[in-house]
Image (cartoon, helix red, strand yellow):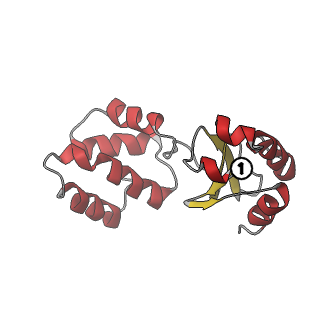
Amino acid sequence: MVISEDTRAAIDSECAKYPQKRGGLLPAMHLVQKQLGHIAPETAVELAEIFDIRPVEVMEVLTFYNMFFSAPRGRHNVYVCTNLPCALRGSRTLLAQIESHLGIAAGETTEDGRISLGHEECLGACAYAPMLRVDETYHENLDLEKANQILDGLE
């Protein structure tokens, strides 16, 4: 069993909030990912058993949402918004510059495991582009110097 007793208790608590147990699947996945850093296929099987569903149903949710990861990631997840409004304000150039600065491409993790870099289609802050999200924190109106300062400050 990979899911800890504490996480399992938190999952049970979340499930109690929903009329159908399955309603707690997304919160449960967040809890498991918080514990383990990702949701591996064997963990998806364990979640499926908790929710009395097939493992493929957990995997469908896991692969649909970009907030869940099926493999280990860096300590920090960094996403640059690259949709059209942000691109018009320089976000794609900023992403390329960040890739160069970190020595990785979007979709990769730095060798030290500090940062996993990606891009988002929309982070919902078009008026403040270019912007990026570090874990759950938004950083807006960026230029390369500000972005590098943020990234270099991550432990």
Q: What's under tag 1, amino acid-wise?
A: Pro
Where 99 falls versus 75 (above or below)? above
Farthest left residue in view: 19
Q: Residue at x 75, y 44 (%)?
A: 89
Q: Nearer the viewer, residue 64 or 42?
A: 64
Q: Is residue 82 visible?
A: no
Tell me: 66 left or right of 20. right
Tell me: 60 left or right of 66. left
Mark 1 highlights which residue?
130
Farthest front residue in view: 127
Where 37 falls versus 87 (above or below)? below
Question: Residue 32: where, in percent of width, then height?
Answer: 40, 55
Question: Residue 49: where, in percent of width, then height?
Answer: 26, 42
Q: Nearer the viewer, residue 44 or 98?
A: 98
Badge 1 crowding class, 10 Å Cα cut-off, few under 14, some 14 to 19, many 20 or more, is many
Q: Residue at x 36, y 62 (%)?
A: 4
Q: Residue at x 17, y 58 (%)?
A: 16
Tell me: 114 left or right of 20. right
- SS for callout 1: loop
Picture quarter containing residue 96? top right
Picture quarter containing residue 84? top right
Q: Quadrant of the C terminus?
A: bottom right
Q: Nearer the viewer, residue 88 or 97?
A: 88
Q: Residue at x 30, y 46 (%)?
A: 25
Tell me: 111 left or right of 21. right
Q: Nearer the viewer, residue 1 or 78?
A: 78
